[in-house]
């Protein structure tokens, strides 16, 4: 497939995900104190929040490997969204919001390609643009969380002006 521009894939970090939302990670011993613990478990949290008045829906989506070409992004205007890498790394294009005549669009000048490693996840701020994860291996599963009904009732797609290739930097 033809593309117009190449963007480097960045590892997920406080800097690479700045202003887009919250990073979720399995805490490393000594990095964070558990809030509850016993002889057989440690509970770390809260790591992040999905704020909505309706119930939060959790699901698992299985993605197949495909070309790292991005032609469009999606937005959920009414909810945060959580994506957590269960059994493999994935790459995902992300972009902040820009408004034109009161309509939200992805800021195409600030699109990034972020690599989320197995055991990491993100919570997008409400309305921020992204696309379905691109797994590194042949098939990967991602834990997904958002406001109940989002998958059916709150997806806005936007075709990009420039077709992008995400590539290791």
Image: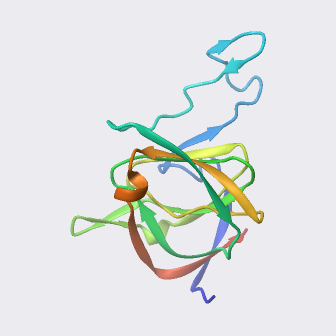
Q: Going 52% across and 34% down the picture, which residue do you hit?
A: 48
Between residues 95 and 64, which one lies in front from this camera angle? 64
Task: Indicate the quadrant where residue 89 lies.
Answer: bottom right
| Residue in the image at 56% along x and 63% along y | 132
Asked whether 81 or 101 is in front, the reply is: 81
Q: Residue 79, position in %: x, y?
A: 38, 47
State the residue lying farthest toward the top: 38
- Across and down, in percent, residue 103 comes to 26, 66
Residue 100 position, x and y percent, is 27, 69
User: Between residues 114 and 90, which one lies in front from this camera angle?
Assistant: 90
Task: State left or right for residue 90 relative to residue 102.
Answer: right
Name the residue at 75% across, 53% down. Answer: 88
Outermost residue, left direction?
101
Give the number of callouts.
Answer: 0
Q: Is 65 on the left or on the right of 111, as rendered?
A: right
Image-quadrant location for residue 1: bottom right
Quick check: 133 above or below 87? Answer: below
Please name whichever residue, 121 or 151, is drawn nearer the observer in this view of the structure: 151
Percent position of residue 104, x then y: 31, 64
Q: How is the image coloured?
A: rainbow
Does residue 100 sit above or below 117 in this rendering?
A: below
Quarter of the image with the C terminus is bottom right
- Farthest bottom residue in view: 2
Taking the spot 77% from the left edge, 15% from the top edge, the residue there is 40
């Amino acid at each position: 497939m033809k593309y117009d521009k190449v963007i480097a894939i960045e590892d997920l970090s406080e800097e690479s995900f700045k202003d887009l939302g919250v990073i979720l990670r399995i805490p490393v011993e000594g990095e964070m104190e558990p809030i509850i613990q016993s002889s057989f478990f440690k509970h770390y949290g809260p790591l992040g929040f999905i704020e909505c008045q309706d119930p939060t829906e959790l699901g698992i989506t299985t993605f197949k490997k495909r070309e790292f070409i991005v032609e469009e992004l999606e937005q959920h205007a009414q909810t945060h969204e959580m994506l957590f890498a269960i059994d493999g790394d994935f790459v995902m294009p992300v972009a902040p919001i820009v408004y034109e005549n009161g309509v939200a669009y992805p800021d195409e000048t600030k699109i990034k390609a972020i690599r989320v490693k197995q055991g990491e996840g993100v919570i997008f701020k409400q309305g921020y643009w992204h696309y379905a994860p691109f797994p590194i291996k042949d098939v990967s599963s991602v834990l997904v969380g958002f406001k109940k009904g989002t998958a059916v009732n709150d997806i806005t797609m936007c075709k990009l002006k420039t077709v992008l290739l995400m590539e290791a930097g």
